[in-house]
Amino acid sequence: DAGVIQSPRHEVTEMGQEVTLRCKPISGHNSLFWYRQTMMRGLELLIYFNNNVPIDDSGMPEDRFSAKMPNASFSTLKIQPSEPRDSAVYFCASRWTSGSSYNEQFFGPGTRLTVL
Amino acid sequence: QKEVEQNSGPLSVPEGAIASLNCTYSDRGSQSFFWYRQYSGKSPELIMFIYSNGDKEDGRFTAQLNKASQYVSLLIRDSQPSDSATYLCAVTGSSNTGKLIFGQGTTLQVKP
């Protein structure tokens, strides 16, 4: 199994530019999570999807951030316009959600974003 | 008050010693508790989970949960230099939607 795939692995952009991060979850998983990690704030959940439907986007910082999951095998996180304070590592994670049982959440390798 | 609190460390222990990592949480209705390990520059990986009060052992790792005190800990026996990493405590909320709330993490350094 390939695991969670994220692209790009590194992104350097200038303030004001649009940034799109991509994620392919593990095949068969029906929940997908986007996290942001910084030294100051730690690992924060931005948004998560169950069966391609956004369930909780309360962690999305502001309107500049948007996320989509058009199908079970692909999700994007877009920042428009980007700002230097968006610099962070963005992780995508996926898991199989079934009833009340908890199954392991697998993280992708992350995208390191630098906004100059 | 943060929802999940950990001492950021670094916690330094000699090789072969027991490392004790602690975590407190604010939501009394939380039901599931997890410990993730994150090496520098890598993504978090799950090492232990616990649902019930008491101890759960897996090899050199023991997770301890005390729901009355809203406290969860991770003990690492016979610590090795390869255990040096940041350990993240994560908790599901009382709504049990599967959403994980992470602590800031404790950095562990195991010195040879």
Image: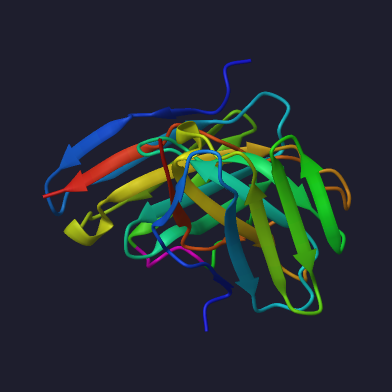
Does the stretch in magenta take in A110?
A: no
Does the stretch in magenta take in A62?
A: yes
Q: Nearer the viewer, residue A19 or B50?
A: B50
> Left or right: A106 with respect to B48?
left
Could you say where residue B80 lies in the image, as x and y percent from the top left? 51, 34
Vertical order, B51 against A8 (above or below): below
At horizontal 44% and vertical 30% (from top left) the residue drawn is: A6
At horizontal 23% and vertical 55% (from top left) the residue drawn is: A81
Vertical order, B60 against A4 (above or below): below
Q: Which is the main secondary structure of the residues drawn in magenta?
A: loop
- Does any portion of residue B40 appear in the rendered image? yes
At horizontal 41% and vertical 35% (from top left) the residue drawn is: B42
**Res. B47 image quadrant:** top right
Could you say where residue B107 lies in the image, as x and y percent from the top left? 43, 53
Could you say where residue B109 lies in the image, as x and y percent from the top left? 41, 46
Could you say where residue B39 lies in the image, as x and y percent from the top left? 43, 38
Q: Quadrant of the N terminus of chain A?
A: top right
**Res. B69 image quadrant:** bottom right
Q: Nearer the viewer, residue B76 or A86?
A: B76
Specify the segment rendered in magenta.
A59-63
Toward the bottom, the furthest residue is B1
Q: Nearer the viewer, residue A57 or B88?
A: B88
